Amino acid sequence: MALSLVGIVGVGLAVAWAAAAVLRPADDPLAAIDHTLVEVVRGEVGSAIHLNTFAAWEPVLIASNRAEGIVTEVHIPPGAEVRQGDLLYEVNERPVTIAEGSVPAYRDVTSGMKGSDVRQLQQLLSDLGWYNGPVVGESGAGTGAAIRAWQRDLGVEATGIVNLGDIMFVPILPSRVALDAGVVHRGAIVVGSEPALSGLPTSPAFTIPVTESQATMMPAGTRVAVSSPAGATWEGFVAEHVREPDSGALSVVLVGAAGAAVCGPDCDEVPVGGSVALASRIVTVEPTKGLVVPSAALISNADGQIAVISANGDALPVEVVVAAQGMSVIEGVEAGTRVRVPATGSR
């Protein structure tokens, strides 16, 4: 009988313990997580990756040499911007001048001739201040006198005849141009038929080869700081992603602010011929100043509200402005607030 009573009492205690265990409020899960405390402080959060940007000119042939003899002088460096009447090089110490015109030089020009090449010559002489007559493509005494005055200024014999090789007409001036160094260099022999002058765009092309994952971090508008050959910093922005049709290689194309040249007024730092690799910093998250906490301090409530946990366990709703490199800029709490950060490996 005594044994039965003890059994009944034992069963009753077990039932009472079970009921108490079921009805007791659950422990606060945050209280069970090891944590440290950090202060919300003012700081800056941002992120960047470092890749090479490749800059290259994309030349297009615009004129051929028509002079014959030995190149005795070269007057322009590759990529130079030239204007009406500038000297390009000399053959047998006779200057070759650049001029604007859609018709290439194809004959000697003197008084008593007419044609588009004559009109282009008259325009050149007018722009240089040697000719004040009508630019109509018919050369008379005024054109002849202007030619002789121009020749005297160049230091050549004033014959009144512009030889075939004296002028190189190109479609648009001013333009950036490059002489073919394999054809036109001091001591080179030219015979009057060599493709010699290429026109360049207003600026080099700037591209960054990227992987698929890198491309996702570089949407249009991403800012890129490019180190120039002279050590300055050029600012570019991602304009588009381009995939090579054959190889499938992916790259991003950069432009300058408001569509200007990435290299600004210093594009002549980029050598003509081939491409140059320039160290670049791609800003994947723009630096943002504000109140900073470790991103690990952030929690998400059931309703999706982001919060931090104060030192005494209160959930303080916050808004995340930006996050990068394990840190977040937040709004909603004051500087100096101490918040919990779970200890490593506890969550």
Image (tube, helix red, strand yellow):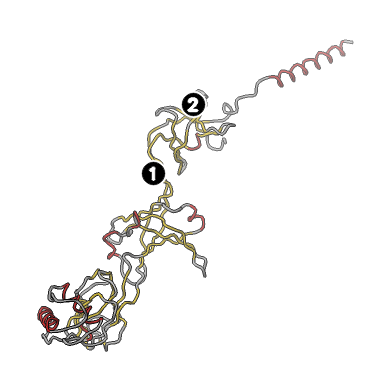
Residue at the spot 14% in from the left edge and 76% down from the top edge:
133
Dot 2 lies on which element? Answer: loop
Residue contact at pointers 1 and 2, CB within 8 angstroms: no
- Front: mark 1 or 2: 1
* Residue 35 disc label: none
Q: Pick whichever of labels 1 and 2 is earlier in the sequence.
A: 1
> Visible in this render: residue 284?
yes
Q: Residues within 10 Å of mark 2 (few under 14, many from 20)?
A: some
> Visible in this render: residue 342?
no
Amino acid identity at mark 2: Ser
In this figure, which residue is indicated by the disc labeled 2?
310
Measured in 3D between alpha carbons, the distance from the residue under mark 1 to the one under mark 2, in whole angstroms, is: 26 Å
Name the image quarter holding the C terminus: top right
Asked where in the image residue 131 lies, by quadrant, the reply is bottom left
Pick whichever, 120 or 112, lies toward us: 112
Pick whichever, 54 or 18, lies toward us: 54
Q: Residues within 10 Å of mark 1 (few under 14, many from 20)?
A: some
Asked where in the image residue 163 lies, by quadrant, the reply is bottom left
* Residue 287 disc label: 1
**What is the residue that sits farthest to the right in this orientation?**
1
Q: How many marks?
A: 2
Residue 183 position, x and y percent, is 29, 82
Residue 157 position, x and y percent, is 11, 86
Residue 39 position, x and y percent, is 42, 30
Left or right of 68 on screen, residue 260: right
Left or right of 280 on screen, residue 31: right
Residue 320 position, x and y percent, is 47, 36
Left or right of 100 on screen, residue 307: right
Amino acid identity at mark 1: Pro
Name the image quarter holding the N terminus: top right
Pick whichever, 61 or 80, lies toward us: 61
Asked where in the image residue 109 lies, by quadrant, the reply is bottom left
